[in-house]
Image (tube, rainbow, N blue to C red):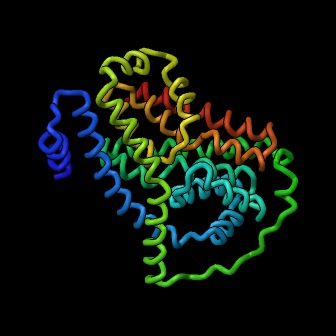
Amino acid sequence: MLKILADYLTYDLLGLNPASRLGGALDFFIYDTVKIFLLLAGIIFLVAVIRSWFPPEKTKQILSHKTRYLGNVVAALLGIVTPFCSCSAVPLFIGFLESGVPLGVTFSFLISSPMVNEVALIMLWGMFGWRIALIYIGTGLIIAVVAGIAIGRLKMERYVQDYVWEMRVGKGEVTTPTWPERLLYAKEYTLGLLKKIWPYVLVGIGIGAFIHGYVPQDFLAKWAGRDNPFAVPLAVALGVPLYSNAAGVIPIVQALTAKGMAMGTVLAFMMAVTALSLPEAVILSNVLKKPLLVTFFGVVTVAITMVGYLFNAIL
């Protein structure tokens, strides 16, 4: 139905040639815009209802009562149901540190929350199938857990800014909202988040449409295909300056895959965009001293690169 609507608007109403680059790009843009925003509205509402069971204070209490390594796993899993971008996850990350959650556990959350996004998971499932979706969530969780454990074992607490340790977060009362309150919260959260992310989504769709319509079929296959041994680190390096949430980068991922980029390289690019960003580095620089900041970005970059090579080999 959506494809019929996009084709009608592009080729019948506007009179563009289906074989033209502009026609193909515009048809892709219209179709993906309608499809993705319909998906986002429904998915974000559902996620917000689930998220109403995990307010920040309750999340802190859960993490604070776990042993170190189990805490990393729980933190990574909780990151899935807290759909933050890399920057908006930082305040909660600081709150975890202030409330006594171990440093490595907090990093597992900081990595998982933007990287393993349930909105992206469902969208990937719809676009690429369950296998790719499960690979995405599985590798994202493994990176979050392993990187958090690695950072925790390095004992780098001294590289957290002193003011963080001097602050204390009181134990707020955890209330249980009613169902009408949960639904009202979900509605307000959905509208608020859509207002916040719609420019990123449109930019992502626009880039994807440009790639779909104008980038030659063999260009990306040549420079970012399986035969180029440097394709994965190049994709990771290109992903870091591109600040976006997972929903915004999905259309780009779809277009890159259609043009022949290897799936492992695409996954590495997507994870770099969502888990590593320059704005996140700027915010974290006010919380972490340089050695810890460099260690965090280095560990995650290496892990994402390894995932890219691994899945290029098996997919």
Question: Where 295 sits versus 259, above or below?
Answer: below
Between 124 and 183, the one lying in front of the other is: 183
* Residue 50 seen in render: no
Q: Residue 176's spot in the image, x, y percent?
A: 56, 82
Between 36 and 75, the one lying in front of the other is: 36
At x 44%, y 42%, the residue is 249
Q: Residue 212's spot in the image, x, y percent?
A: 31, 31
Question: Where 86 sits versus 235, above or below?
Answer: below
Which quadrant: the C terminus?
top left
At x 61%, y 55%, the residue is 88
Q: Residue 210's spot in the image, x, y percent?
A: 35, 32
Q: In the image, is 16 to the left or to the right of 136?
A: left
Number of marks: 0
At x 42%, y 48%, the residue is 201
Q: Spot the residue most to the left.
A: 12
Question: Where 32 sits versus 314, above or below?
Answer: below
Q: Residue 175 occupies which quadrant of the picture?
A: bottom right
Q: In the image, is 83 to the left or to the right of 44?
A: right
* Residue 183 seen in render: yes
At x 61%, y 33%, the residue is 301
Question: Where 52 sits versus 139, above or below?
Answer: below
Q: Residue 151's spot in the image, x, y percent?
A: 72, 43
